[in-house]
Image (cartoon, rainbow, N blue to C red):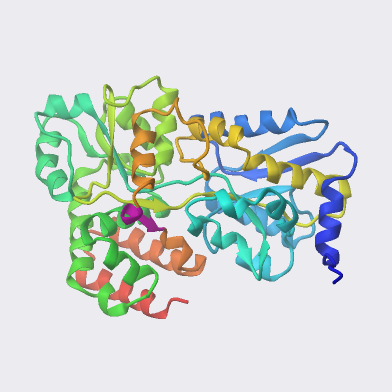
């Protein structure tokens, strides 16, 4: 019997194995905070050390801005070499339009599917048996970061539930601290809502809302309690939150101006950069939730199709490097995220990373991220709603929840 390799796959494999030709590989990303820059510099350094090809950094503040530029460049015919996206449906339009490199040759050769974990984060990269992106980390959003000294000075204990937080917030405020450091940007308000939804309503409601798009559950008592609690939190933030970046908000906790911030595990990089130690200066608490969870979000890189074979060759080289065990160790220790493979050396991991690794080993604690189930358009509608609700104290819980029900009921 004679076997043949599909032409596209053969060409991709051939390009990847061509003699080296130098190329500048432009990489669009939104890692612009101090901690994030330290992490992305690891990737740039490791890529530059592979040979003559060079990482050309294009950092654009805020994810929605970076993704918009990447889309414009790709559809406009001047694509970057690579672009950062989230583990989500954000780039499925590019796959459907045939504008992304098929990375199957390198993914099959290196057996990515055998070590990328959990499998759900690899799913968005795959369509019709082909691979179109590279997961680089596993990020979880379900964390509250607290300043230990602020809690001690206020005479209250750190929260393990949202009810705990609400009970201690008046004392923290009376002691002269901001109870909740919150950045006034749509994505941050949506992140706060998601943290409360999973932490208060639990995993079953989470899946019924995002995966099943169950309007009855979205309009039920569990989700109503989330809207009520979000409304109560307004009084415990500060007047300077409007438009504030997440890392500037994290700095309020680092410097002892605020007690706590809800943010993903990428906030750890800011504490590390400031020389703070977990368990001494700050704590990272899953949730807060009576049952801690690890949401499977993360970052991926896509590789738009190119006309220059040298750039294409550099793309496949970078794709391979991103999943390398050594690079995974260096990058994720700097980033505060978890590696996409479990055969890496995380002996240098601090207490916060170890908490995430422990949760990752528990199948019952792993929850698929919302972005695997809803489109960017649906996300935008929810962000608009939550921003209006957060900034309009006169907006009733009934009105906000009814709009949420309508959005979920109409979601793709």
Q: Nearer the viewer, residue 196 or 114?
A: 114
Q: Nearer the viewer, residue 250 or 122?
A: 122
Q: Which residues are magenta?
A: 363-368
Q: Residue at x 50, y 68 (%)?
A: 375
Percent of width and height locating residue 388: 33, 62
**Residue 42 vs residue 36: left or right?**
right
Q: Quadrant of the N terminus?
A: bottom right
Q: Quadrant of residue 38?
A: top right
Q: Residue at x 32, y 31 (%)?
A: 252
Q: Is residue 181 visible?
A: no
Q: Residue at x 17, y 70 (%)?
A: 221
Q: Nearer the viewer, residue 391 or 141?
A: 141
Q: Nearer the viewer, residue 328 or 312?
A: 328
Kindly give the residue lying farthest to the front in the view shown.
1
Percent of width and height locating residue 46: 68, 30
**Residue 218 vs residue 377: left or right?**
left
**Residue 126 vs residue 293: left or right?**
right
The relative height of residue 197 versus residue 214 in the rendered view (above or below) is above
Q: Is residue 105 magenta?
A: no
Q: Residue at x 12, y 29 (%)?
A: 154
Please state the total of marks drawn on the protein image: 0
């Amino acid at each position: 019997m004679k076997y043949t390799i599909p032409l596209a796959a053969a060409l991709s494999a051939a390009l990847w194995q061509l003699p080296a030709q130098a190329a500048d590989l432009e990489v669009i990303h939104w890692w612009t905070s101090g901690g994030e820059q330290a992490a992305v510099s690891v990737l740039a350094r490791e890529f530059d050390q592979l040979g003559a090809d060079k990482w050309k950094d294009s950092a654009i503040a805020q994810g929605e801005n970076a993704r918009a530029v990447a889309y414009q460049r790709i559809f406009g015919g001047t694509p970057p070499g690579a672009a950062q996206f989230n583990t989500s449906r954000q780039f499925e339009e590019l796959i459907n339009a045939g504008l992304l490199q098929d990375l199957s040759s390198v993914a099959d050769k290196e057996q990515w599917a055998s070590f990328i974990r959990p499998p759900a984060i690899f799913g968005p990269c795959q369509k019709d048996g082909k691979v179109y992106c590279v997961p680089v980390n596993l990020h979880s959003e379900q964390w509250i970061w607290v300043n230990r000294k602020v809690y001690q000075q206020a005479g209250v204990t750190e929260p393990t539930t949202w009810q705990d937080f609400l009970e201690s917030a008046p004392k923290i405020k009376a002691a002269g601290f901001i109870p909740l450091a919150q950045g006034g940007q749509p994505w941050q308000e949506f992140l706060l809502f998601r943290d409360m939804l999973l932490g208060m309503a639990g995993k079953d409601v989470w899946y019924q809302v995002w995966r099943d798009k169950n309007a009855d559950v979205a309009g039920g008592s569990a989700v109503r309690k989330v809207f009520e609690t979000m409304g109560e939190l307004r009084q415990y933030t500060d007047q300077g939150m409007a438009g504030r970046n997440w890392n500037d908000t994290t700095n309020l906790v680092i410097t002892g101006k605020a007690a706590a911030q809800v943010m993903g595990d990428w906030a750890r990089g800011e504490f590390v950069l400031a020389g703070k130690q977990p368990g001494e200066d700050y704590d990272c608490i899953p949730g807060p939730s009576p049952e801690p969870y690890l949401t499977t979000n993360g970052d991926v890189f896509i590789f738009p199709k190119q006309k220059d074979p040298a750039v294409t060759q550099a793309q496949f080289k970078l794709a391979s490097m991103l999943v390398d065990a050594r690079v995974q160790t260096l990058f994720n220790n700097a980033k505060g995220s978890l590696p996409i493979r479990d055969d890496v050396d995380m002996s240098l991991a601090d207490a916060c990373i170890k908490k995430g690794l422990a949760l990752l080993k528990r199948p019952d604690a792993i929850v698929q991220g919302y972005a695997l189930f809803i489109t960017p358009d649906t996300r935008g509608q929810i962000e608009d709603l939550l921003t209006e609700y957060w900034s309009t104290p006169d907006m009733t819980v009934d009105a906000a929840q009814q709009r949420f029900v309508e959005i979920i009921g109409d979601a793709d």
